[in-house]
Amino acid sequence: MGLIKEPKNIDLSTKSEPWTEQELADFRKIMQDIKAKNAKRKKRLKNF
């Protein structure tokens, strides 16, 4: 088994930058919308 070289134009590092307050707020809004949509779907299916 050999080592696989990283392509020159691709960075495979796992370091990530912290989110800004605006990005975090947007993400939380999206997650709330998804959870609300899933809750409605569960409630609708439960009635059948």
Image: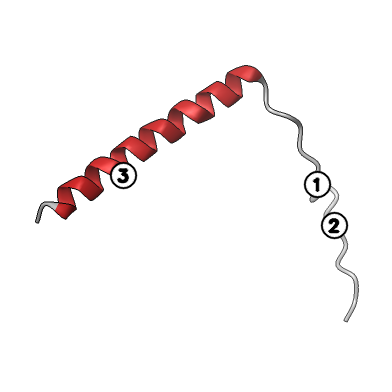
**Residue wearing tag 1:** 11
Label number found at residue 6: 2
Q: Are marks 1 and 2 in contact (CB under 8 Å)?
A: yes
Give the image location of residue 36, x and y in percent. Answer: 32, 36
Q: Is residue 7 above or below residue 15?
A: below
- Local secondary structure at mark 1: loop
Label number found at residue 38: 3
Query: What's the residue at 59%, 25% (across, down)?
Result: 24
What is the crowding at mark 1: few (fewer than 14 residues within 10 Å), some, or many (at least 20)? Answer: few
Q: Could you tell whether 20 is left or right of 32 in the image?
A: right
Mark sitting earlier along the chain (1/2): 2
Q: Is residue 29 above or below residue 44?
A: above
| Distance in Å between CA atoms under marks 1 and 2 | 7 Å
Q: Could you tell whether 44 is left or right of 33 in the image?
A: left
Q: Which amino acid type is shown beneath numbered disc 1?
A: Asp
Tell which residue pokes out farthest to the top in this image. Answer: 22
Q: Which amino acid type is shown beneath numbered disc 2?
A: Glu
Q: Are marks 3 and 1 in contact (CB under 8 Å)?
A: no
Colour option used: secondary structure
User: Which one is closest to the eye, mark 2 or mark 3?
Assistant: 3
